[in-house]
Image: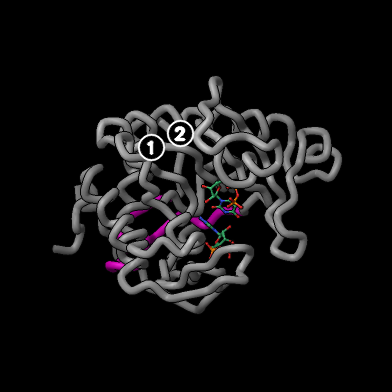
Amino acid sequence: MTKTVDVKKGDLLYAGKAKSIYKTDNPDYTIMAFRDDVSAFNGVKLEQLQRKGQINNFFNGFIMQKLEEAGIPTHFVGFTSETESCVKKLDMLPLESVIRNRAAGSIAKRYGLKEGLEFNPPTVEFFFKSDELNDPMLNESIILTLGYATQDQLDQMKDLSLRVNTVLSEIFDKAGILLVDFKLEFGLFNGQIVLGDEFSPDGSRLWDKETLEKLDKDRFRQDLGGVVEAYEDVANRIGVPDYFA
Ligand code: ADP
Ligand code: UDP
């Protein structure tokens, strides 16, 4: 199951809020480095959480491999270190795709919904990825008119996001965890839509099925403590291995 890959790390291309992207000796690949930085409220609240980078790297690699097995094209190539993965270099679309199975966060606030309200069918939302503009919500018409994606790309992103939801809801359910919501990002590789970025407790909401305890970044947003411990608990429950043990 350990998927490691041997590529040479080059110059830094981009440092985001939680990850850094490096060139490699293969123009099709980049290295994604998961840092210990955690941020919320568009970078206003910032901290470092020891070991988070490693946990999220393994968490993401594990999930991406599960999605590949289910036929979803992802950028994941393999691990290059405890905190780094080799991924296909994508031309990222400037969109965030958010799927929700229950009300929480911004949708609960926007429509005055009680946290935990079940959604059937799940909702699909797109946001414009812009720190400057605070990631405003988009609709299909705006996406098409502003050229952020074509109709075909949009249809594929919706379909893939919902398929990711089906695959991951089952994995978390078996571990006694509710997949409340999550954010995905897609990009183009040789013109094809591919799932990029990451899936980890940093970009999803995961609640214990019995106690409804939050096991994701809301622990950081809401100062609940035990952030890394919760991420590790989820990783253990779904069977994420220590790939470099
Ligand atoms: P942010 O940019 O939101 O602060 P991160 O710290 O997570 O976020 O930085 C990771 C950046 O890398 C994001 O901008 C993301 O869109 C981009 N990215 C993710 N996957 C890939 C990929 N496969 N190829 C190129 N860029 C990617
Ligand atoms: N999310 C994310 N990055 C963002 C915005 C949202 O990873 O820039 C994730 C967030 O962690 C949650 C889901 O997307 O799992 C839905 O977030 P929401 O719209 O409720 O916004 P928030 O409560 O984070 O402001």
Look at the picture and state if 30 lies above or below 180.
below
Look at the picture and state if 94 lies above or below 21.
above
Whether the residue under disc 1 has CB within 8 Å of ligand 1: no
- On residue 164, the disc is 2
State the residue at coordinates (80%, 37%).
Answer: 144
State the residue at coordinates (25%, 36%).
Answer: 175
Residue 53 on the magenta span: no
Q: What's the CA distance linking mark 1 and mark 2?
A: 7 Å
Q: Residue furthest top?
A: 120
Q: Residues within 10 Å of mark 1 (few under 14, many from 20)?
A: some
Q: Which image quadrant is residue 69 in? A: top left
Residue 81 on the magenta span: yes
Quadrant position of the C terminus in the picture: bottom left
Residue situated in front as seen by the camera: 205 or 52: 205
Q: Are marks 1 and 2 in contact (CB under 8 Å)?
A: yes
Q: Residue furthest right?
A: 145
- Horizontal and vertical percent position of residue 228: 33, 63
Q: Is residue 127 left or right of residue 72?
A: right
- On residue 59, the disc is none
Q: Residues within 10 Å of mark 2 (few under 14, many from 20)?
A: many
- Horizontal and vertical percent position of residue 115: 54, 38
- On residue 67, the disc is 1
Q: Tell me the magenta residue range.
A: 76-91
Identity, as a three-letter code, of the amino acid under mark 1:
Leu
Q: Which image quadrant is residue 119 in? A: top right
Residue situated in front as seen by the camera: 221 or 54: 221
Q: Is residue 134 left or right of residue 166?
A: right
Ligand 1 - quadrant of the structure image: bottom right
Whether the residue under disc 2 has CB within 8 Å of ligand 2: no
Residue situated in front as seen by the camera: 139 or 234: 234
By secondary structure, the bulk of the magenta-drawn segment is best described as strand
